[in-house]
Amino acid sequence: MESLESTRFCSKTLLLLLISLICSPLPSSLAQQQQHESNPTIRTMEDFSGYPIHEPGQFGSIINLASSLSVDAPGLQKQIDELSSFSDAPSPSVTRVLYTDKDVLARRYVKNLMTLAGLSVREDAVGNIFGKWDGSEPNLPAVATGSHIDAIPYSGKYDGVVGVLGAIEAINVLKRSGFKPKRSLEIILFTSEEPTRFGISCLGSRLLAGSKELAEALKTTVVDGQNVSFIEAAKSAGYAEDEDLSSVFLKNGSYFAFIELHIEQGPILEDEGLDIGVVTAIAAPASLKVEFEGNGGHAGAVLMPYRNDAGLAAAELALAVEKHVLESESIDTVGTVGILELHPGAINSIPSKSHLEIDTRDIDEARRNTVIKKIQESANAIARKRKVKLTEFKIVNQDPPALSDELVIKKMAEASTELNLSHKMMISRAYHDSLFMARISPMGMIFIPCYKGYSHKPEEYSSPEDMANGVKVLSLTLAKLSLD
């Protein structure tokens, strides 16, 4: 009888407390919400039931979200290891080239992870993959994140991949915390960030940003080293069925913001013992193709005064690239002769043709363009001096730099601080898909340390702890922006 009376008393108490909660007005400000959360009535209800009275994020607040974010770091590392097995090179190297069998299998693996995370998955005509978590107001522009999974020959397993698998884990982190987004959150796996197969970097994001010239070239003239056309390769992987690549284009403002998580690919964060890099700008890359044509001949029979050596013209231009970059007197100006090929390529034959591919970049577009102009002037002068022909000087691409959005920078920095992670503002000297997403959306990037700054080589590595820190910052930044 005593137990029955006690039960009745508890039931009446609960009923009164519920009535009190229903009659209480909803908090209309941050201060009111804090008062609501500290209400002893609510605490009693939560203690009695074992569940919160309202879900985190229901009132548009993320006050306590930072402390509730829990990353499955071992699970993320396992997924990265599994994805690296889809490779045309033996471990620890990774080679994953656009539209190859290994690329298709890797895409399938990621789509499966998106589905398991409860995301709705779609693909466009070139294979950009999208996984969306619908918010409470799905008609608002979504907040997006993502990166790429293609890998240059004999590279590592973290470049780009951390930004894709880490983004999926970030969504899982938010779901586990009970957070509910207002704006939808969308993950993008970009097609072919690397230029390995068709010589075009950030192919998928360039198209998303609306490059009509690229869309036309891909339909008509672009082929790989085996003379396979882009359309043929895309169809072999199940894409480009109608060949209308303009369907990939996104309108400006399609996303409220875009954030990319990435390994730094440089040594600064590790050297300075910092957890996070908040990227403020991405350097502007430009690619050049140069060819000289001279007279070949026997390496012993043709005397030095009578030579028109295309190989020496190329060597002299390579040194001129270094000279003009250093003349800028800026640490942010860089230049690289990444490819230098000689024909016929025999030790006892004077090169009759030479081919160079040059990369130069800077965060200052005008300064970068000045370097390009000087390189072209040197190429012409070298050709005259050595009596060879400058048969090609082609600017393959000459992209403008991109600045991160002030609001996105603020939210990334706030997230780092709230998570008690050290951070610094920094520039990305490598280009990323974010460079082109900035043309249609406010953009930002989150860097995490990588071992000795290594990238594009098998030794590339980022620790589970550093990846978990990056995922937490990404999660909290996405949450903040989704409620904005």
Image (spheres, grey):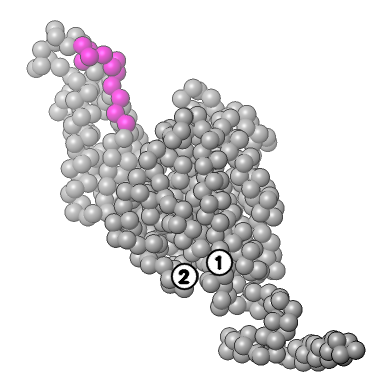
The residue at the point 37 percent across, 40 percent down is 459
The residue at the point 30 percent across, 44 percent down is 360
Residue 187 locus on image (x, y percent): 59, 54
Secondary structure beneath dot 2 equals loop
Can residue 363 be seen by looking at this rendering?
no
Residue 251 left/right relative to 18:
left
Residue 29 locus on image (x, y percent): 61, 87
Are the residues flagged by discs 1 and 2 in contact, CB closer than 8 Å? yes
Secondary structure beneath dot 1 equals loop
Residue reaching furthest right? 1
Q: Which one is nearer the viewer's eye here, 111 or 483? A: 111
Q: Which residues are magenta?
A: 339-350
Residue 310 left/right relative to 53:
left
Q: Residues within 10 Å of mark 1 (few under 14, many from 20)?
A: many
Residue 418 locus on image (x, y percent): 47, 73
Q: Which one is nearer the viewer's eye here, 457 or 47? A: 47
The residue at the point 28 percent across, 21 percent down is 342
Amino acid type at circle 2 is: Leu
The residue at the point 19 percent across, 25 percent down is 312
Q: Which mark is residue 69?
A: 1
Q: Which circle's residue, 1 or 2, is located before the other in the chain?
A: 1
Residue reaching furthest top? 301
Residue reaching furthest front? 1
Q: Which one is nearer the viewer's eye here, 35 or 309? A: 35
Question: To which residue does mark 2 refer?
Answer: 419
Amino acid type at circle 1 is: Leu
Q: Which mark is residue 417?
A: none
Q: Residues within 10 Å of mark 2 (few under 14, many from 20)?
A: some
- On whether residue 341 falls in the magenta region, the answer is yes
Can residue 320 be seen by looking at this rendering?
yes
Q: Which one is nearer the viewer's eye here, 291 or 341? A: 341
